[in-house]
């Protein structure tokens, strides 16, 4: 049987193999993605981001256990993206913890991605893995990323619902917020609520949320409005979702049910307001544009010799041409 059919039939081994092919950008993986695409679009994609060590993996683990414990258990996929430490570090460690708690449950599939992504970058590779899990019938897919760089923001943007995880002590210099990641938060989680400093963190975050509401010029309701894709900058219309702050103690499981409820509320809100469709459109358009960029670049580079290309760089170094002039002359050269 072919790999795609096996994946659609729920074969976990086939799923693992296909994910590896997609992660490594192998031709058969890309062909499989084309075949699977019509089966995607059903899952609720939940981005989970925040500074290292705030408890993202522990929390996702507990959320997965919670969703599995329901009378109508949901199938849970987890993609942990950790480009900073390819072979050790957070994602893999977090995985070990999860493997122990979730091992043997066929309703959960965990994948950590250690590569830096290939064609079209990390966000596109992540998107491919998520598509495979979506097609395979996983109903809620958590996408966990460490840090607050542009890559994490791009990945978080692929989600319908984005959780930003803070923790006391981390919140004092609020790294994540500096990078503007709060702009993409639908739900803010203060994890490690058992630790001292929770109240300070909560106060700081509330203050920042109020500030964000006041300084949103285009939002007549005064509510927080997440800024969407770098490519498509249009603010969401009619967004009156109130960003909520949830407290959790991931190691005890405290607040996990309430967090899961908030995630479900957000999904319902997106569905009822029509924003789900809007986010889907933005997400797919962003994927399309990343792939177009990558493909056009690849195609164009094959039309020009390495020597010619390096000459253009040389003339930049010598300040004989400006970057824009160099681009124009390179593009002219490749057309002739
Ligand atoms: N006290 C306390 N410790 C916690 C809590 N949640 C997680 N931890 C601990 O914090 C550490 C980091 O937890 P992880 O879940 O690996 O955090 P992470 O954000 O996934 O870490 P990275 O993936 O490395 O960025 C672990 O030692 C956890 O046991 C909590 O609610 N309270
Ligand atoms: Mg982790």
Image: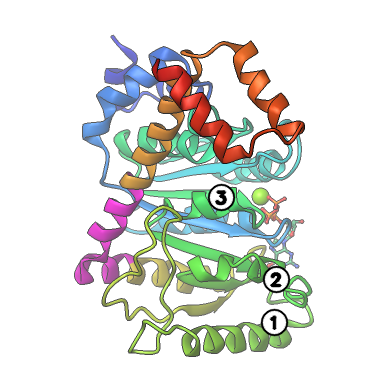
Residue 144: assigned label: 3
- Displayed quadrant of residue 4: top left
Q: Residue at x 67, y 19 (%)?
A: 310
- Give the CA separation, mark 3 to mark 1: 22 Å
Ligand 1 rendered quadrant: bottom right
Q: Is residue 324 above or below residue 225?
A: above
Is label 2's Cβ within 8 Å of ligand 1? yes
Q: Are marks 2 and 1 in contact (CB under 8 Å)?
A: yes
Q: Which portion, as a residue range, is magenta?
A: 267-284
Horizontal placement of 312 versus 185: left or right?
right
Q: Residue at x 74, y 38 (%)?
A: 85
Pointer 1 residue: 201
Pointer 2 residue: 167
Horizontal placement of 297 versus 205: left or right?
left
Q: Secondary structure at mark 1?
A: helix
Residue 225: assigned label: none
Residue 9 showing in the rendered view: no
Instruction: Please provide percent x and percent y for residue 92.
Output: 68, 38
């Amino acid at each position: 049987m072919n790999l795609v059919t096996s994946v659609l039939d729920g074969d976990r081994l086939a799923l693992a193999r296909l994910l590896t092919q997609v992660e490594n950008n192998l031709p058969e993986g890309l062909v499989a993605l084309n075949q699977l695409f019509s089966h995607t679009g059903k899952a609720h994609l939940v981005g989970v981001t925040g500074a290292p060590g705030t408890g993202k993996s522990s929390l996702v683990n507990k959320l997965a256990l919670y969703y599995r414990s329901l009378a109508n258990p949901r199938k849970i996929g987890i993609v942990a993206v950790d480009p900073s430490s390819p072979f050790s570090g957070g994602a893999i460690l977090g995985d070990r913890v999860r493997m122990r708690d979730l091992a043997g449950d066929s309703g959960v599939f965990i994948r950590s991605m250690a590569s830096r992504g290939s064609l079209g970058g990390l966000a596109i590779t992540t998107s491919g893995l998520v598509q495979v899990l979506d097609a395979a019938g996983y109903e809620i897919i958590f996408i966990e990323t460490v840090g607050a760089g542009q890559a994490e923001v791009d990945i978080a943007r692929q989600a319908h619902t984005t959780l930003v995880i803070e923790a006391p002590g981390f919140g004092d210099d609020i790294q994540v917020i500096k990078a503007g990641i709060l702009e993409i938060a639908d739900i803010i989680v203060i994890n490690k609520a058992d630790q001292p400093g929770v109240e300070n963190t909560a106060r700081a975050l509330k203050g920042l949320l109020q500030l964000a509401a006041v300084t949103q010029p285009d939002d007549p309701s005064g509510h927080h409005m997440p800024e969407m894709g770098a490519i498509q900058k249009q603010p969401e219309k009619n967004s009156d979702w109130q960003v909520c702050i949830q407290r959790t103690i991931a190691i005890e499981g405290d607040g996990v049910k309430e967090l899961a409820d908030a995630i479900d509320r957000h999904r319902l809100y997106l569905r009822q307001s029509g924003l789900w469709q809007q986010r889907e459109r933005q997400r797919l358009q962003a994927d399309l544009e990343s792939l177009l960029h990558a493909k056009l670049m690849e195609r164009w580079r094959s039309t020009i010799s390495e020597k010619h290309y390096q000459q253009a760089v040389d003339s930049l170094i010598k300040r004989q041409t400006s970057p824009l002039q160099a681009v124009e002359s390179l593009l002219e050269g490749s057309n002739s």
